[in-house]
Amino acid sequence: MRDVLLAKRYEVHYQENVGGHDYLSWRGSLADGLLALMGTSK
């Protein structure tokens, strides 16, 4: 999907992590993903 979006010239923030699909694996990157989706206010 990332490659398709890049080919269509969308802005893509992609991060791949080693781990499972549980809290211990995604807890560190959840805030980063939410900030990428929502943006930051100034």
Image (spheres, rainbow, N blue to C red):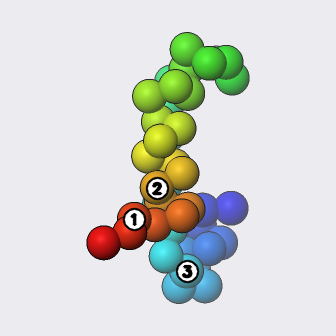
Residue drawn 48% across and 59% down? 36
Counting from the top left corner in percent of width and height, residue 18 is at: 51, 24
The residue type indicated by label 3 comes to: Tyr
Q: Helix, strand, or loop for circle 3? A: loop
Label 3 and label 2: CA atoms lie apart by: 17 Å
Quarter holding the N terminus? bottom right
The label on residue 10 is 3
Residue drawn 30% across and 72% down? 42
Label 1 and label 2: CA atoms lie apart by: 6 Å
Mark 3–mark 1 CB contact (< 8 Å)? no
The residue type indicated by label 1 comes to: Thr
The label on residue 40 is 1
Counting from the top left corner in percent of width and height, residue 21 is at: 69, 23
Res 23 → quadrant: top right
Q: With respect to residue 11, does 19 lie above or below?
A: above
Graded by Cα atoms within 10 Å as few (under 14), some (14 to 19) or many (20 or more), the crowding at tag 3 reads: few
Residue drawn 49% across and 76% down? 11
Mark 1–mark 2 CB contact (< 8 Å)? yes
Residue to which mark 2 is pinned? 35
The residue type indicated by label 2 comes to: Leu
Counting from the top left corner in percent of width and height, residue 35 is at: 46, 55
Query: Is residue 5 at least partly visible in the picture?
Result: yes
Query: Is residue 15 at least partly visible in the picture?
Result: no
